[in-house]
Image (cartoon, rainbow, N blue to C red):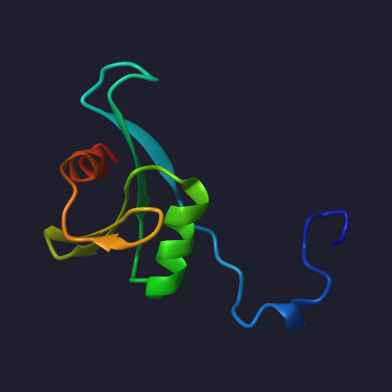
Amino acid sequence: MSRDGELDNLELYPVKPMKLQYFEVDAFASKPFHGNPAGICPLERWLDDALMQNIAAENNLSETAFFVPRGDDYELRWFAPSVEIDLCGHATLASASN
């Protein structure tokens, strides 16, 4: 790695690096370190399923919500550290705080 943090050998990485926003939000709480924490990751478009699963596993919260705008609404998907799940209330509420 070079001094400015750039990768010297991009051949090791088959995709172009990207920047993502990721937030940890304490749902059901009015102050930090209370409530039920969830990861939220707003996206412009869906990422590969394996990448979203790896992001959730890396951050190791009970659930991470990923969401994509669709007109006036949003599509949401939820991942636990080891599997995609069907629904998560506190991660959905946390997404609305963004």
Q: Is residue 41 left or right of residue 96?
A: right
State the residue at coordinates (73%, 79%): 12
Residue 20 image point, x, y percent:
48, 57
* Extreme residue in the front direction: 82
State the residue at coordinates (11%, 59%): 72
**Position of the C terminus by quadrant:** top left
> Vertically, is 52 above or below 34?
below
State the residue at coordinates (33%, 19%): 34
State the residue at coordinates (46%, 46%): 60
Q: Is residue 28 left or right of residue 41?
A: left
Residue 89 image point, x, y percent:
15, 43
> Vertically, is 63 above or below 71?
above
Q: Is residue 10 left or right of residue 94?
A: right
* Extreme residue in the right direction: 3
> Vertically, is 20 above or below 32?
below
Residue 63 image point, x, y percent:
32, 47
**Position of the N terminus by quadrant:** bottom right
* Extreme residue in the left direction: 72
Q: Could you tell me how many numbered marks the image carries?
A: 0
Q: Which sits in the foreground, 61 or 74?
A: 61
> Vertically, is 9 above or below 1?
below
Q: Which sits in the foreground, 90 or 6?
A: 90
* Extreme residue in the top direction: 31
Residue 93 image point, x, y percent:
18, 39
Q: Is residue 91 left or right of residue 34?
A: left
**Quarter assignment of residue 84:** bottom left
